[in-house]
Amino acid sequence: MNAELEYSVMQHHASELRQAAAEQRRVREALRGPRAERRHRSVFARFRSA
Protein backbone atom coordinates (compact mmCIF):
# COMPACT_ATOMS: atom_id res chain seq x y z
CA MET A 1 0.00 0.00 0.00
CA ASN A 2 1.33 3.39 -0.95
CA ALA A 3 2.39 5.51 2.01
CA GLU A 4 0.52 8.68 1.03
CA LEU A 5 -2.73 6.76 0.64
CA GLU A 6 -2.18 5.01 3.96
CA TYR A 7 -1.54 8.38 5.61
CA SER A 8 -4.72 9.93 4.19
CA VAL A 9 -6.76 6.93 5.33
CA MET A 10 -5.27 7.29 8.82
CA GLN A 11 -6.09 11.01 8.84
CA HIS A 12 -9.67 10.31 7.80
CA HIS A 13 -10.06 7.64 10.48
CA ALA A 14 -8.65 9.97 13.13
CA SER A 15 -11.07 12.73 12.17
CA GLU A 16 -13.98 10.26 12.36
CA LEU A 17 -12.85 9.20 15.84
CA ARG A 18 -12.61 12.85 16.93
CA GLN A 19 -16.09 13.51 15.59
CA ALA A 20 -17.51 10.48 17.43
CA ALA A 21 -15.79 11.56 20.65
CA ALA A 22 -17.24 15.06 20.35
CA GLU A 23 -20.70 13.59 19.78
CA GLN A 24 -20.37 11.34 22.85
CA ARG A 25 -19.29 14.34 24.92
CA ARG A 26 -22.36 16.30 23.75
CA VAL A 27 -24.60 13.36 24.64
CA ARG A 28 -23.07 13.05 28.13
CA GLU A 29 -23.39 16.80 28.73
CA ALA A 30 -27.01 16.70 27.58
CA LEU A 31 -27.79 13.80 29.91
CA ARG A 32 -26.04 15.52 32.82
CA GLY A 33 -27.71 18.88 32.16
CA PRO A 34 -31.09 20.11 33.42
CA ARG A 35 -34.21 18.42 32.07
CA ALA A 36 -35.42 21.49 30.12
CA GLU A 37 -32.03 21.96 28.51
CA ARG A 38 -31.89 18.28 27.58
CA ARG A 39 -35.27 18.45 25.87
CA HIS A 40 -34.31 21.63 24.02
CA ARG A 41 -30.94 20.21 23.00
CA SER A 42 -32.41 16.95 21.67
CA VAL A 43 -34.91 18.90 19.56
CA PHE A 44 -32.08 21.08 18.29
CA ALA A 45 -29.93 18.03 17.52
CA ARG A 46 -32.79 16.38 15.66
CA PHE A 47 -33.33 19.57 13.66
CA ARG A 48 -29.62 19.87 12.88
CA SER A 49 -29.22 16.23 11.80
CA ALA A 50 -32.27 16.36 9.49
Image (cartoon, rainbow, N blue to C red):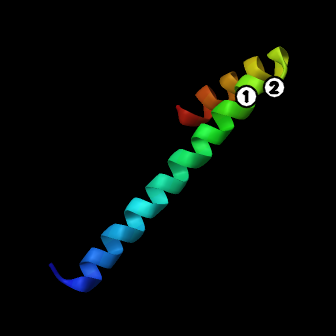
Closer to us: 37 or 50: 37
Task: Give the image quarter of residue 14.
Answer: bottom left
Task: Give the image quarter of residue 25.
Answer: top right
Q: Determine the CA span between mark 2 and mark 1.
A: 5 Å
Q: Quadrant of the N terminus?
A: bottom left
- Label annotation for residue 33: 2
Closer to us: 44 or 15: 15
Disc 1: which residue: 30
Look at 61% across and 47% down and name the residue there.
22
- Label annotation for residue 13: none
Whether 29 is drawn above or below 18: the answer is: above
Measured as percent of width and height from the top left, residue 4 is found at 28, 84
Whether 36 is drawn above or below 7: the answer is: above
Whether 23 is drawn above or below 16: the answer is: above
Circles 2, 1 touching at the beta carbon (< 8 Å): yes
Look at 67% across and 24% down and name the residue there.
42
Look at 74% across and 17% down and name the residue there.
39
